[in-house]
Image (cartoon, grey):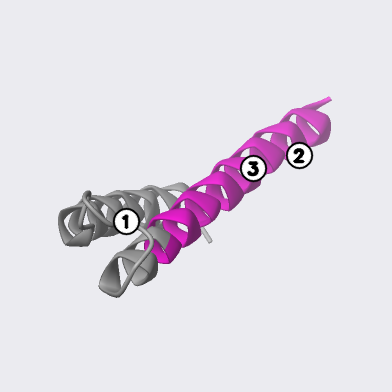
Amino acid sequence: MNKTLSIVLIILALVLITYNVTLIDFDEPLKGNSVVALIGIVASLCAILLLLIYLTSKKIQKKIEDN
């Protein structure tokens, strides 16, 4: 997986977060479809975190190989 694909996936996860925020009923955030939206937000945040860890590990690997 290259850097551009990772960036595209991060952007898609951000789009999913913004979409799921629009689905949350802020009067009752833990009922109905709001729970599904909250789970989607948490899942997207986890995906972003994993992709950032992956990009960081690739940078470290490249530095080690250059030395």
Q: As shown in the figure, which amino acid type bears the numbered disc 2?
A: Gln
Residue, x 80% and y 36% (percent of image)? 65
Residue, x 30% and y 49% (percent of image)? 14
Image quadrant holding the C terminus, namely: top right
User: Among all residues in the image, which is located at the extreme left?
Assistant: 22
Q: Pointer 1: what residue? A: 29
Q: Position of residue 41 (x, y in %)?
A: 39, 56
Q: Pointer 3: what residue? A: 53
Viewer-closest of 21 and 29? 29
Label 1 element class = loop
Please count the marks in the image: 3
Foreground disc of the pair 2, 1: 1
Residue, x 46% and y 47% (percent of image)? 3
Q: CA distance from mark 2 to mark 1?
A: 42 Å
Q: As shown in the figure, which amino acid type bears the numbered disc 3?
A: Ile
Characterize the local packing of mark 1: few (<14), some (14-19) or many (20 or more) Cα atoms within 10 angstroms: some
Label 2 element class = helix
Which comes before the other along the chain, label 3 or label 1?
Answer: 1
Viewer-closest of 5 and 17? 17
| Mark number, residue 61 | 2
Q: Is residue 6 left or right of residue 18?
A: right
> Can residue 62 be found in the magenta stretch?
yes
Q: Which residues are magenta?
A: 39-67
